[in-house]
Image (cartoon, rainbow, N blue to C red):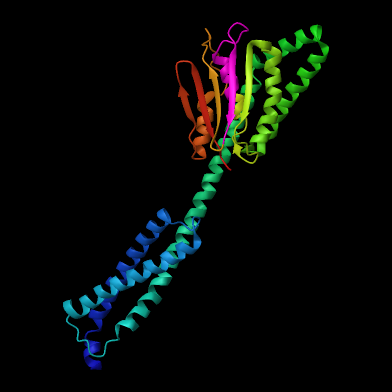
Amino acid sequence: MKEDLWNNFHKQLSAHYVVIFAMCIADYRLLLILNKYLPYSKNIFLRIVADILGITLICLILLWIFNFLIYDVFLVPRDGLPPLSVKFAFAMAANIPILLVFELIHYFQSEQKAIADSEKVKRQVLLFQHETLRSQINPHFLFNSLNVLSSLIYINQENANKFTKALSKTYRYVLSLTQQPVVSIAEELLALDSYIFLMRMRFENAFTFTVNKIAFNEQNKIIPLTLQLLIENAFKHNIATEESTLNITINIDNDYITVENNIQPSGSTDKGGIGLRYITKQYKIHAKEVKVEHTEHMFIVKIPYIQS
């Protein structure tokens, strides 16, 4: 009997290699499917149960294949070979380490990808902040601000003082964003007050500005200066006079911040500044989509939250 088993050893070894190779492929496919439909971040307990059920099913299928190869293809006698329960125990003992190795490989690859993506986001954010700062401190913006300030000094010194403080707060907020890839809604709205004050001093009663807090969560995060840049675009691309009032509204709900304004195209448009394309690009980095609706009378931009 021992001689028969030794004579068939090469056949059994070949069958084992085939089964182990198939086990590796099956485990890898199982890992891909579970990572896609049931990742650990979704439900750890269900994922572990799915792993156990998956490798159990794989072992049963591969045992059937192994028995078929040994007994029906290689025609090895059944006498002296271990029973199914022993084979299953050995299969599970071999399969669990294989799956763990694949899990570890996937984990380290995910970590490396997360680090690379984080560095990419940091570079993009730094670029965004540089462009934003350059946009805010351009000659046109400074000329308008200083022109308004110069007029206020002679007309109303108290408002001139308030204008100077608001301008200082606006620049201080921009300069404070170096280490902040995202900010809370509360921070953004607070900084926006200073900017709106500057616009109020410049355009007086030529525009209306309304904030509707439909469902306000102060912890929701967005890209810094998003609201300010969208409002700046509204002034840049539209006429704002007392006869043709520019109406700007911000609606805050559970899913989006919506910035909308009536359309009153200006004759000449300043093409400088960051604009909507930069905002859209920044949200794409965070896998978020900025929705733009351009109707006959309204221009609407829906900003998703980066974090809730």
Q: Nearer the viewer, residue 217 or 221?
A: 217
Percent position of residue 92, x then y: 38, 75
Quadrant (top left, top right, bottom left, bottom right) of the N terminus:
bottom left
Is residue 167 inside the magenta stretch? no
Classify residue 90 as left or right of residue 168.
Answer: left
In the image, residue 50 above or below residue 207: below
Percent position of residue 121, x then y: 55, 40
Residue drawn at (62%, 33%) of the image:
224
Quarter of the image for residue 133 reads top right
Residue drawn at (65%, 16%) of the image:
141
Quadrant (top left, top right, bottom left, bottom right) of the C terminus:
top right
Residue drawn at (79%, 19%) of the image:
162
User: Magenta residues?
Assistant: 230-253
Residue extending furthest toward the bottom: 1
Percent position of residue 150, x then y: 76, 9
Quarter of the image for residue 167 reads top right
Q: Nearer the viewer, residue 83 or 150?
A: 83
In the image, residue 205 above or below residue 229: above
Q: Nearer the viewer, residue 308 or 70?
A: 308
Residue extending furthest toward the front: 214
Classify residue 232 as left or right of residue 104.
Answer: right
In the image, residue 81 above or below residue 255: below
Percent position of residue 302, x then y: 52, 30
Classify residue 23 as left or right of residue 35.
Answer: left
What is the total number of numbered labels drawn onto the structure image?
A: 0
Quarter of the image for residue 172 reads top right
Q: Nearer the viewer, residue 217 or 118?
A: 217
Residue extending furthest toward the right: 157
